[in-house]
Amino acid sequence: METETKRQSKDSRLSEKHWMPVLALYRACLKNAEELIKEASLLYENGCYARAFFLGISAYEEVGKSQIVADYFNGMVSKKEFDESFQRHDIKSAYFSRYFQLDAKIPGKAAIVYDKKKVKEHMNWRNASLYVDCKADYSAEEPSKVVTAENAKAVIEAVKKEISDIHVASYMTERIGSASFAK
């Protein structure tokens, strides 16, 4: 199982000398996501819904990045995708919502599929939760008036569930990343 970008790349397997640093990097990303969601929860509990939403979205992206790192370790994503996960919001967000699709061309083989174009609305919400925008009539659109308590709670709960699912799948399969969900 691999992404289309990995399938088309000429990347070699991760060198054994890099296994432990990449595993530590995976754990650091997942730990950071857990810390971000804890802080988002604190903001939510104190009525700071826009910033709680922003940190929730940041945790969402960090979970996506952790899964890219895990899948890089497993040889499922390319070095290019790995590098992009440390530079671009769209790939991290898209990878959080990846899915597995059976490959009609290769029986018994599946592909990891994600779509960076589908996260545009997600990115708009992320920006709206942090920055004041200017409407067509020049009036201010403030984050605290755009993001509701329900929006913040929904993203916090979704990320908490995903983190929990990752831990359960990893524990049960003794694997990380997409491999832990597809055993």
Image: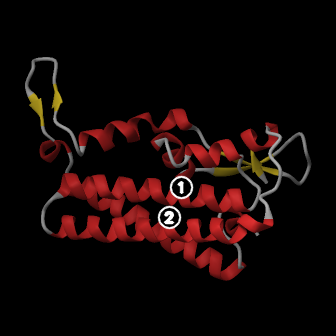
Three-letter residue code for mark 2? Cys
Identify the mark at residue 124; answer none if there is no mark: none
Q: Residues within 10 Å of mark 2 (few under 14, many from 20)?
A: many
**Amino acid identity at mark 1:** Lys
Identified at 64% across, 82% down, the residue is 171
Residue 62 in percent (x, y) is at 46, 58
* Residue 113: quadrant of the picture: top right
Q: Residue furthest front?
A: 17
| Occupied quadrant, residue 56 | bottom left
Mark 2–mark 1 Cα distance, whole angstroms, equals 7 Å
Q: Nearer the viewer, residue 48 or 62?
A: 62
Q: What residue is disc 2 on?
A: 29
Q: Residues within 10 Å of mark 1 (few under 14, many from 20)?
A: many
Q: Where does label 1 land, which residue?
A: 65
Picture quadrant where residue 140 is located:
top left
Q: Residue at x 13, y 47 (%)?
A: 144
Quadrant including the C terminus: bottom right
Instruction: Assign the N terminus to one quadrant of the image.
Output: bottom right
Residue placed most toward the observer, 128 or 79: 79
Relative image position of residue 28 (x, y in whole percent): 50, 69
Q: For this view, does 146 lie left or right of residue 35?
A: left
As drawn, 135 above or below 92: above
> Dots 2 and 1: beta carbons under 8 Å?
yes
In this figure, what is the number of numbered marks? 2
Image coordinates of residue 59 in percent, x first then y, are 40, 59
Coordinates of residue 23 in the picture (x, y in percent): 64, 70
As drawn, which residue projects farthest toward the right? 107
Give the residue displayed 77% in from the left and 58% down from the top: 14
Secondary structure type for disc 2: helix
Q: Earlier in the sequence, mark 2 or mark 1?
A: 2
Q: Determine whether 73 is above or below 120 in the image.
A: below
